[in-house]
Image (tube, grey):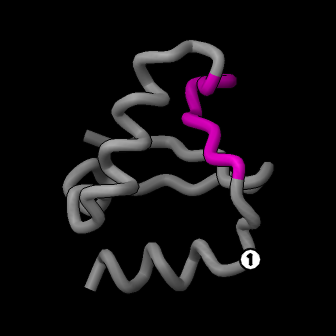
Amino acid sequence: KVVNLNVGGKSFITLRSTLAESPTLREYVERAEANLEFSKDGATFIDRDPTHFPIILAHMRN
């Protein structure tokens, strides 16, 4: 399943299986999806600086 993330205002799209590489991130996204306050326009909001998130995401993909 494809997951839309909004990290500090920047959009990222990844697979749920990629998020599973980080138990902490996977758990956060699951809880945020259950709480509509953390969703906007179909994306799950993560209140973090998006600067380094592409590096983290690339690491989880590899």
Q: Quadrant of the C terminus?
A: bottom left
Front residue of 61/35: it is 35
Horizontally, residue 57 falls left or right of residue 46, namely left
Q: Residues within 10 Å of mark 1 (few under 14, many from 20)?
A: few
Q: Residue at x 53, y 84 (%)?
A: 55
Q: Residue at x 60, y 24 (%)?
A: 39
Q: Position of residue 5 (x, y in %)?
A: 55, 46
**Quadrant of the image occupied by residue 34:** top left
Q: Residue at x 64, y 17 (%)?
A: 37
Q: Position of residue 13 (x, y in %)?
A: 49, 53
Q: Specify the farthest residue to the top.
A: 36
In this view, 55 is above or below 15 = below
Horizontally, residue 26 falls left or right of residue 17, namely right
Q: Bounds of the magenta span?
A: 38-47
In this view, 44 is above or below 24 = above
In this view, 24 is above or below 45 = below
Question: In the image, what residue type sits under mark 1?
Answer: Thr
Q: Position of residue 31 (x, y in %)?
A: 40, 29
Secondary structure that dominates the magenta span: strand
Mark 1 highlights which residue?
A: 51
Q: Residue at x 65, y 80 (%)?
A: 52
Q: Quadrant of the N terminus?
A: top left
Helix or strand or loop: what does disc 1 sit on?
loop
- Let me know if residue 46 is in the magenta part: yes
Q: Specify the farthest residue to the front.
A: 24
In this view, 59 is above or below 23 = below
Q: Position of residue 19 (x, y in %)?
A: 31, 57
Horizontally, residue 37 falls left or right of residue 15, namely right
- Let me know if residue 42 is in the magenta part: yes
